[in-house]
Amino acid sequence: MAKSTRDPKQQPKGAGMHFAIVAGRFNAHIVDPLLKGALAAFKKAGVPDPVPVIYVPGAFEIPLAAKKLIETKKYDAVLTLGAVIRGDTPHFDFVAGECARGVMQVSLVTGVPVIFGVLTTDTDAQAVARAGGSTGDLIVDNKGAECAFSAIETVEALRLAGQK
């Protein structure tokens, strides 16, 4: 298997790669900055515009939408964005766990990377901080941007391994 020669500190290059994003509408005040960060990171990495964004009601619906996007065979990877914030009921445990399991299952079944960018936090403040709230920067401290770069790097790695 080929070994990556890319410096891990170097930003991945996304030219010629195609991505789609599935974003949950629930907790939009968190998801919107994640989405802006992801789109800014894709642009910075040279990913061709536009990157399609499909909205679903919440995190629970994300895996199926990701699978349907992959079935079009248009995308090298799909990025998922959402926010599930712990409350006073067990709802958090069910939604967060099933979303994560579903995203992983779609990736393993299809062989296409599905990047898990769904924040699972105890508080709203933690979610805001992970969506770039601590700096206000679209890329720094923004898990959406981090996930976009992860998607590019994963596609690079699969191509080096002869899988994509």
Image (cartoon, rainbow, N blue to C red):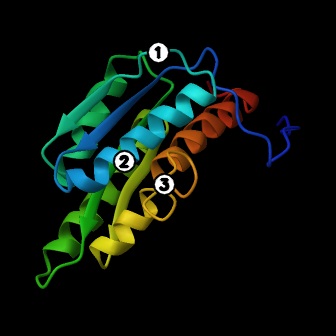
Q: Quadrant of residue 16?
A: top right
At numbered mark 1, what does the secondary structure look like: helix, strand or loop? loop
Amino acid tagged 2: Pro
Q: Amino acid at mark 1?
A: Asp
Looking at the image, can residue 117 be seen?
A: yes
State left or right for residue 48 relative to residue 60. Answer: right
Q: Amino acid at mark 3?
A: Lys
Identify the disc placed on residue 143. 3
Earlier sequence position, callout 1 versus callout 3? 1
Image location of residue 132, percent across then percent down: 46, 56
Which residue is at 28% across, 59% downward?
83
| Of 80 and 4, the residue lying toward us | 80
The circle drawn on residue 35 is none
Task: Report, in whole angstroms, how far the alpha carbon at label 1 lies from the one at label 3.
Answer: 20 Å
Identity of the residue furthest to the front in this view: 136
Rendering coords of residue 21 (x, y %): 36, 33
Label 1 crowd (10 A; few <14 / some 14-19 / many >=20): few
| Residue 66, position as x, y percentages in the image | 31, 35
Between discs 2 and 3, the one toward the N terminus: 2
Vertical placement of 31 versus 44: above or below?
below
The residue under label 1 is 49
Please give the name of the residue rendered at 13% of the width and 73% of the height, measured from the top-left corner.
91
Residue 49, above or below 116: above
Q: Nearer the viewer, residue 33 or 62?
A: 33
Q: Nearer the viewer, mark 2 or mark 1?
A: 2
Q: Position of residue 75 (x, y in %)?
A: 45, 21
Q: Secondary structure at mark 2?
A: helix
Q: CA distance from mark 2 to mark 3?
A: 9 Å
Q: Are marks 2 and 1 in contact (CB under 8 Å)?
A: no
How many numbered tags mark residues here? 3
